[in-house]
Image (cartoon, grey):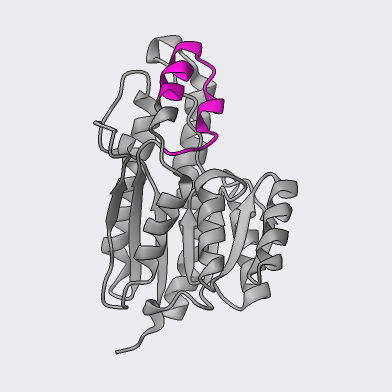
Amino acid sequence: MSDWNEKVEEKVVVVTGASSGIGEAVARTLAKEGARVVLAARRVDRLEKIVAEIREAGGQALAHAVDVTKPEDFQALVDATVAHFGGVDVLVNNAGVMPLSPLAAGKVDEWRQMVSVNVMGVLHGISAVYPRFREQGRGHLVNVSSVAGHVVFPGATVYCATKFAVRAISEGFRQESGPNIRSTIICPGAVESELASHITDAGLRETIRSFESIAIPAESIAQAVLYAIRQPATVDVNEIIVRPTAQTL
């Protein structure tokens, strides 16, 4: 049996939302395991700092600016990855925003932002990388959803809808992509991140920040991604939910 999927070393992994939180942790963890990582986000200064630190530690990394709401940005990201590293083996669609608010608040612009980033961003990634996967005859799509893709919370209706959508898209991709292209959904619970800073509703911002006392490190999610990626070629880990032990929902 080929061990292509059993080794992380030398795999080329693109990670969006890599300037902080889960994305940063995934990039650092995979680089430490020997993967060649491409860190993508809008904050290029932050990306370049992380890339410099990865390289100083002996890893291989590249920074690339991307706005996942723009399909041309995502295509340029994949093209730059192929030009620099010769291919792309794994895409970790991690970029996301969480400006929670009650529906009655009518924050249409924030709803549109969540759909654009959390849903269309994932689809733009698939559109850019899927032809490459088909040409190679292999590849791995890792989409970061949330426990909010399983349970709806008051004040989080639109956010939950976007994360349910990510799970639906991931499952559809799995069914359509054939036997040699893998699809994994990662569903984090309360994790240390900057997501609460996106919330403009004061009450919900404080509610979410109350979870900080039980939040687990982003490294915990990175380990789940690593687990899925390093499985043998015949194994497709379709979904992983990772919560703090103290989280009930």
Q: Is residue 227 above or below residue 11?
A: above
The residue positioned farthest toward the bottom in the image shown: 1
Task: Provide residue 73's location: percent of width, then percent of height.
Answer: 64, 53
Q: Is residue 73 above or below residue 58?
A: above
For the point 51% across and 40% down, which residue is it?
117
Question: Relative to 146, is 192 on the left or the right?
Answer: right
Q: In which quadrant of the rendered view does residue 59 lie? A: bottom right
Nearer the observer, 100 or 79: 100
Q: Is residue 237 magenta?
A: no
For the point 40% across and 15% down, which residue is it?
102
Quarter of the image where the N terminus is located: bottom left
Q: Main secondary structure of the magenta part?
A: helix
Quarter of the image where the C terminus is located: top left
Nearer the observer, 210 or 113: 210
Nearer the observer, 219 or 35: 219
Q: Is residue 202 magenta?
A: yes
